[in-house]
Amino acid sequence: MISIDLSGRVALVTGSTRGIGRAVAENLAQAGATVILNGRGDRLSAAADEIKERHGGNVAAIAADVANADAVAAMVQNIFKTFGRLDVLVNNAGILKDGLIGMIRSDDLNSTIAINTIGTLNCIQSGARLMQRTGGSIINMSSIIGVRGNAGQLVYSASKGAVIAATLSAAKELAPKGIRVNAIAPGYIDTDMIRSIPPEIHQKRLESIAMGRIGDPQDIAETALFLASDLSRYVTGQVIGVDGGMLV
């Protein structure tokens, strides 16, 4: 049986107080990595304490708005001063705001692009500078909607499609520096993000999944763990769909 040991490695997971980000942080900590949680809410410190209590090891929390380049640079500088390295960067922070074309609020458009796209670019820029010292793995969270598109999700689709394009470009540029860059494109996953979806739409989306079940955050977290580990040492520039065979 293959076991994944990330002892001695330092990982930053953005948007990690709940859902997919929390599951990713839990798995990395369980594998022995030092994990830095990132977010903006009141739950950040509590989430770090809970993961440390459950898995032991070194778990820290840094509050920062990923859409703010200066805040991201300061966060990475803090990681360098405290831990001296960064081996794994998981760009998970994101928001979802649906809207039909012609009815999309400017605030929703700007905030979605700011967090989902610009936030990812900010973290790649600052994180890659530190990761050049040791090499490592950058894992960007996209979406099946960023790959296939969907009615009513113009802005979200654009923001996540841009993450895929950034992944492919960064993978080419950073490979000679020993940094792998890949993206995960989750399908319909059981997180707080989908709790407000009307029952009839939920059922329709469930019926579109070939495996017949909604995804679990752990399904995504285990893929991230693979990409963070040496098991994926020759994998870069890939977009891995984790969607149970969902059709959009």
Image: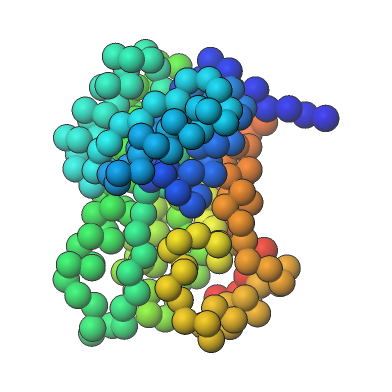
Q: On screen, 116 above or below 150?
A: above
Residue 31 location, x and y as percent?
Answer: 62, 27
Residue 135 showing in the rendered view: no
Check the image and name the residue furthest to the right. 1
The residue positioned 47% from the left and 68% from the top of the image is 194
Residue 86 location, x and y as percent?
Answer: 41, 23
The residue positioned 63% from the left and 70% from the top of the image is 246
Residue 106 location, x and y as percent?
Answer: 16, 71
Q: Is residue 65 left or right of residue 16?
A: left
Report which quarter residue 242 is drawn in.
bottom right
Report which quarter residue 121 is drawn in.
top left
Q: Is residue 29 left or right of residue 64?
A: right
The residue positioned 65% from the left and 80% from the top of the image is 207
Identify the colour scheme used: rainbow
The residue positioned 45% from the left and 49% from the top of the image is 18
Camera-nearest residue between 193 and 9: 193
Q: On screen, 33 above or below 143?
A: above
Residue 60 showing in the rendered view: yes
- The N terminus: image quadrant: top right
